Image: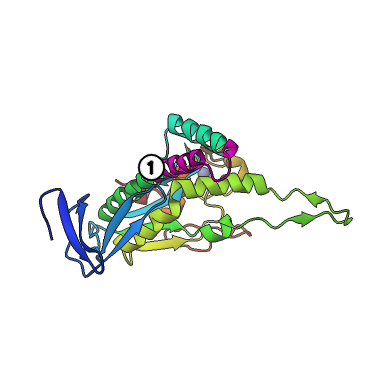
Amino acid sequence: MTLSRKWAAVNVPKVGWVRFRLSRPVPVAKSYRITYDRAGRWHIAFAVVPPPVPGPGTGQIAGVDRGITVSAAVSTGELLSCPGLTEAEQQRLKDLQRRFARCNLGSNRRQRMKAAIAKLYARGRDRRKDWVEKTSTDLARRFDVIRVEDLRIAQMSRRPKPKPAPDRSGAYLPNRRRSKAGLNRGILANGWGQLVRRLEHKAAGRVEKVKSAYTSQTCSVCGHCASESRKSQAAFRCVACGHEANSDVNAAVNIAAGRAVSARRETLVQVSLKREPQLPTSA
Ligand SMILES: [Zn+2]
């Protein structure tokens, strides 16, 4: 039941009428769920199946790559970055965590710190969600086929196994756990998994997963595959033809072309190698 432009109410069994503020227009829904988050906020969510976003119908293909320097790169050359916490907010989070660690167990102060930390995390999460929604709608609307790299996020996020030293001295060999942890944080913070999931909802049947091996080392113009072409994290310069590009965009063009290369450096998916390689970049 809508009360005004800003307020509405629902009849919750055993509780009675509960008033809530509208953050968006309420669609016709059969069910709802009320939740309480760690930042101390109550939410009401209505279950509706959103209508799929129609594509342009022009056969436009885009490749989207999970970026390293930005959150995602599109084969059109666009670099998308998912917002998180600002520098100042990250600093504040660090301070709060340090103070939290020094609080006495069970103290009120500790509880307050905990709530403040949760609130900051929730802020970052909300921003990321907002970005994911806007970006997925935009991509679904502009392109008929959206190719993404087939990354197994769950696999990549798994903790690396400890490697015991072969002489069984009880010591462990380095297993790159720290660096992997950093990478995982990056992936999760960038909301890549969320973006792909929402894309699959909105552009149902129009999202294709392409094997991602070597897409970052392969030239999107001549197809030459060499690790030396990857000059740095950000820059790609083909050692064969001299093509220069942002390395994430170069990979996104390969993904758009459905071009994936096996470990033996053979082309596995030969979707559009015979086509003009730059085709998918037309905006
Ligand atoms: Zn080249």
Residue located at (29% from left, 46% from top)? 283
Q: Is residue 243 visible?
A: no
Q: Is residue 107 above or below residue 145?
A: above
Residue located at (40% from left, 52% from top)? 63
Say left or right for 232 vs 126. right
Q: Amino acid at mark 1?
A: Arg
Say left or right for 227 vs 127. right
Say left or right for 160 vs 236. right
Span colored in magenta: 101-122
Which residue, given by chain and number where applicable, does mark 1 sit on? 123
In reply to whether residue 79 is colored magenta, the answer given is no
* Percent of width and height locating residue 33: 30, 64
* Percent of width and height locating residue 121: 44, 44
Q: Is residue 106 visible?
A: yes
Say left or right for 54 vs 5. right
Q: How many marks?
A: 1
